[in-house]
Amino acid sequence: MKTSKFPLHPRYPERICWGCDQFCAADALRCGNGSERTPHPVELFGNDWFDWQNGEPADTVPDQSTAGADPGQHD
């Protein structure tokens, strides 16, 4: 069985349907997976789509060392 590797940052994602493992050209949808091309995640969520965790980009996840601290409390 041939296993295809899903590209994280394809050069021209708009040219391909990403709905199945066939990766058909946008104007030649062979699998019948709907009548529209399935967009690549980079088209929907941006270049950092793969780094997201729990719906947030990895660089915006709160620091656990300050979680729950009172923001009005000063040392």
Image (spheres, rainbow, N blue to C red):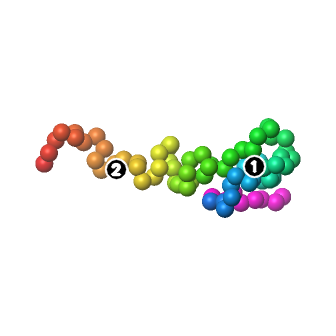
Secondary structure at badge 2 equals loop
Callout 2 amino acid? Asp
Q: Residue 63 carries which label?
A: 2
22 on left or right of 52: right
Residue sitting nearer the eye, 65 or 53: 53
Q: What stretch is highlighted in magenta?
A: 1-8
Quadrant location, the N terminus: bottom right
59 on left or right of 74: right
In primary-sequence order, the first of circles 1 and 2 is 1
Reading the image, the residue beneath label 1 is 17
Is residue 12 depicted above or below 53 in this figure? below
| Residue 64 image position (x, y, % from top left) | 34, 48
The reply to whether the magenta stretch includes residue 5 is yes
Q: Image point 14% across, 45% down: which residue?
A: 74
Q: Residue placed farthest to the right in the image?
A: 30
64 on left or right of 1: left
How many numbered marks are there?
A: 2
Secondary structure at badge 1 equals loop
| Residue 34 image position (x, y, % from top left) | 79, 37
Q: Image point 34% across, 50% down: which residue?
A: 63
Q: Give the image quarter of residue 68.
A: top left
Q: Image point 86% across, 47% down: which residue?
A: 30
Is residue 7 depicted above or below 64 in this figure? below
Task: Tell whether label 2 touches label 1 (CB within 8 Å).
Answer: no
Q: Residue 26 carries which label?
A: none
Q: Image point 62% across, 59% down: which residue?
A: 9
Q: How far apart are marks 1 and 2 (CA)?
A: 38 Å
Principal secondary structure, stretch drawn in magenta: loop
